[in-house]
Image: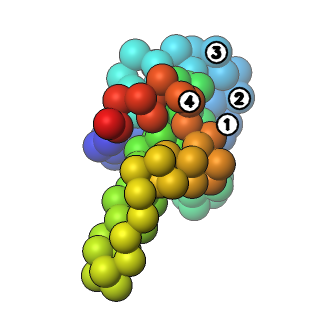
Amino acid sequence: MKISIANDIEAVSSVKSRIPEVFQESSKTQRPKIITQNGKAIGVMSDIGVYENMVKKINLMKLVIEGEDSANTQEMVSLSSLKKKIKEKYGLSSSVLAKVG
């Protein structure tokens, strides 16, 4: 996700009156809006789909890091144990886990 300084940063005063439009724009561009006050970033507004995709990517990165750590320590686990751990820790659905193997 690439942020456009010209298009994705807005003052809170200009966003207040157009909140629905800001969410529509985030949905269309697939980018969040950085909200500023007195020239400082105070928050982020994002379409729910953009937010959910970001959370999924973060969780996937966590899994990759865990896998790398396990490989570096030569700690091996069975695929079924791994799927169970992923489901418990990250709440991934069975249909997603079925694609793992």
Horizontal side, residue 6 vs residue 55: left or right? left
The circle on residue 20 is 3
Marks 1 and 4, how far apart in space?
Answer: 41 Å
**Neighbour tally class for label 1: few under 14, some 14-19, many 20 plus, Cα within 10 Å:** few
Element under label 1?
Answer: helix
Q: Can the viewer see residue 43 in this picture?
A: no
Q: Residues within 10 Å of mark 2 (few under 14, many from 20)?
A: few
- Disc 2 marks which amino acid? Lys
Where is mark 2, residue-wise? 16
**15 or 44: nearer the eye?**
44
Q: Secondary structure at mark 3?
A: helix
Q: Residues within 10 Å of mark 4 (few under 14, many from 20)?
A: few
Q: Which residue is mark 1?
A: 13
Instruction: Tell which circle, 1 or 4, labels the residue nearer the N-terminal end.
Output: 1
Q: Quadrant of residue 74?
A: bottom left
| Residue at left offset 29%, top offset 74% | 71
Query: Looking at the picture, does residue 1 appear above or below residue 77?
Result: above
x, y (%) of residue 31?
40, 33
Query: Looking at the image, which residue is at 62% across and 53% down?
Result: 89
Q: CA distance from mark 3 to mark 1?
A: 14 Å
Q: Are marks 1 and 4 in contact (CB under 8 Å)?
A: no
Spatial CA distance of label 2 from label 4 is: 37 Å
Q: Quadrant of the N terminus?
A: top left
x 56%, y 30%: residue: 93
Three-letter code for the amino acid on which mark 4 is drawn = Ser
Q: Earlier in the sequence, mark 3 or mark 1?
A: 1
The residue under label 4 is: 93
The C terminus lies in which quarter of the figure? top left
Evaluate if marks 1 and 2 touch, with contact meaning CB atoms under 8 Å apart: yes
| Mark nearer the viewer, 3 or 1 | 3
Q: Report the mark closest to the observer, 1 or 4.
A: 4
